[in-house]
């Protein structure tokens, strides 16, 4: 999906397709434009498409191979682009997730269940001479040399 196809969508549909609101997308694209500088030849994908590619990777769990087929680029290009966009967004500090302790409130009751999975001896009948049946030696053929 290219940015040209989704930029005219309603706000609800935009969020359904990308996973972020249009306002959040605009903030993200401003950070990406400021963080990634153009040098060398012009990239094949616009900054919006690069951000959409990263959001597609995060939201849909698609492989880089399939994303590359969608955008007409190689798997390596997809990998490099996603890493660049992720790094720029993380360096900005605006788009970090809260830490583990912030996500779990302290008043939450946690129930712990322990399962004892250690080996236990199995009761088996004891071996004795009376319980085994010995075959007759005469029933076993001997080798003839």
Image (cartoon, helix red, strand yellow):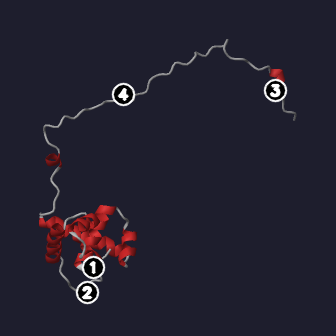
User: Which of the 4 quarters of the picture holds residue 113?
Assistant: top left
Whole-number angstrom distance, CA of label 4 to CA of label 3: 49 Å
Whole-number angstrom distance, CA of label 1 to CA of label 2: 18 Å
Find out whether the residues at labels 4 and 3 contact each other: C-beta distance under 8 Å.
Answer: no
Image quarter (top left, top right, bottom left or bottom right) of the C terminus:
top right
Residue located beneath label 3 in the image:
140
Whole-number angstrom distance, CA of label 2 to CA of label 3: 87 Å
Q: Which mark identifies residue 116?
A: 4
Q: Earlier in the sequence, mark 2 or mark 4?
A: 2
Question: As rendered, which of 29 and 135 lies closer to the eye?
Answer: 29
Whole-number angstrom distance, CA of label 1 to CA of label 4: 58 Å
Residue located beneath label 1 in the image:
4
Q: Residue 70, image x and y in percent?
A: 37, 74
Number of other residues with Cα within 10 Å of mark 2, as a class: few under 14, some 14 to 19, many 20 or more? few
Image quarter (top left, top right, bottom left or bottom right) of the N terminus:
bottom left
SS of the residue under disc 2: loop
Disc 1 versus disc 3: nearer the observer: 1
Q: Which mark identifies residue 35?
A: none
Q: Residue 13, image x and y in percent?
A: 26, 67
User: Which of the 4 quarters of the picture holds residue 90?
Assistant: bottom left
Q: Earlier in the sequence, mark 2 or mark 3?
A: 2
Disc 1 versus disc 2: nearer the observer: 1
Q: Residue 112, image x and y in percent?
A: 26, 32
Whole-number angstrom distance, CA of label 2 to CA of label 4: 62 Å
Residue located beneath label 2 in the image:
42
């Amino acid at each position: 999906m290219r940015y040209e196809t989704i930029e005219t969508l309603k706000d609800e549909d935009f969020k359904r397709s990308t996973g972020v609101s249009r306002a959040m997308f605009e903030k993200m694209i401003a950070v990406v434009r400021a963080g990634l500088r153009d040098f060398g030849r012009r990239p094949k994908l616009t900054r919006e498409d690069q951000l959409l590619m990263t959001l597609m990777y995060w939201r849909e769990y698609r492989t880089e191979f399939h994303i590359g087929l969608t955008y007409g680029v190689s798997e390596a290009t997809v990998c490099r682009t996603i890493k660049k966009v992720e790094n720029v967004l993380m360096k900005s500090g605006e788009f970090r997730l809260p830490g583990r302790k912030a996500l779990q409130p302290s008043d939450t009751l946690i129930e712990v269940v322990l399962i004892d999975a250690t080996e236990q001896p199995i009761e088996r009948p004891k071996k004795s001479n009376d319980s085994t049946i010995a075959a007759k030696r005469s029933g076993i053929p001997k080798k003839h040399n």
